[in-house]
Amino acid sequence: MKLRIEGKSTIAEIQKAFSDEFVYLKLVFFTRPHRAYKGSSAKFLIEDRACPLAELTTLKREGDLYLEPEMPVWQVERLFEEEYGLHVQVFRKSGSVWL
C-alpha cells in the first residue's frame, strides 16, 4: 500500500486510507513516542482527527510511505517516526475491542 504523507493531510485521511487497506487494523496518533513493546499513554493521544499533520510535527519531508501486509507492526510504527516524525501506534480489532 502507498500512503501519501503531506502537511495538509489530516489524521482522519491517513487513518481511513490505512484502515481501508488493513480492515482489522487502525492507526492512532500521539504527541510523543512510546518505548519498544510498550503502549503510549492516553494523555498523549491526539483526539482531533481533523488536525493536519503539519500541526503535529515539523514534517521531515513529504512523500509516499510504502507499507506491505507482511510488515511487522514495529516496522510500520518506526517508518512513520523515522521518515516523517509522526508518532503512531497500530491497533488491531479483537471482537469489539481495539488492542
Image (tube, grey):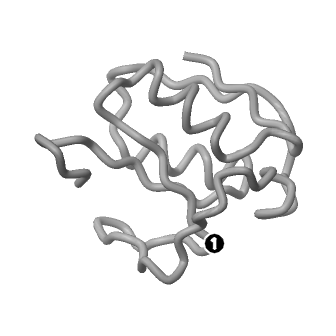
User: Looking at the picture, how far across and down is residue 24, in whole percent?
Assistant: 29, 31
Q: Residues within 10 Å of mark 1 (few under 14, many from 20)?
A: some
Residue 35 against residue 90 in the figure, above or below: below
Element under disc 1? loop
Q: Which quadrant would the N terminus be assigned to in this image?
A: top right
User: Looking at the picture, how far across and down is residue 55, in whole percent?
Assistant: 84, 62
Which residue is painted at 33% across and 48% down in the image? 91
Residue 6 sits in quarter: top right
Q: Nearer the viewer, residue 10 or 57?
A: 10
User: Looking at the picture, how far across and down is residue 69, in whole percent?
Assistant: 37, 20
Q: How many marks?
A: 1
> Left or right: where does residue 83 sit relative to residue 69?
right
Residue extending furthest bottom? 43
Residue 94 sits in quarter: top left
Which residue is painted at 38% across and 24% down in the image? 22
Q: Which residue is mark 1?
A: 31
User: Looking at the picture, how far across and down is residue 68, in whole percent?
Assistant: 45, 20
Residue 77 against residue 93 in the figure, above or below: below
Q: Which quadrant would the C terminus be assigned to in this image?
A: bottom left
> Left or right: where does residue 90 sit relative to residue 9?
left
Residue 38 sits in quarter: bottom left
Say what amino acid the circle numbered 1 marks. Thr
Which residue is painted at 34% across and 70% down in the image? 39
Which residue is painted at 42% across and 79% down in the image? 41
> Left or right: where does residue 96 sit relative to residue 79?
left
> Left or right: where does residue 91 sit relative to residue 4?
left
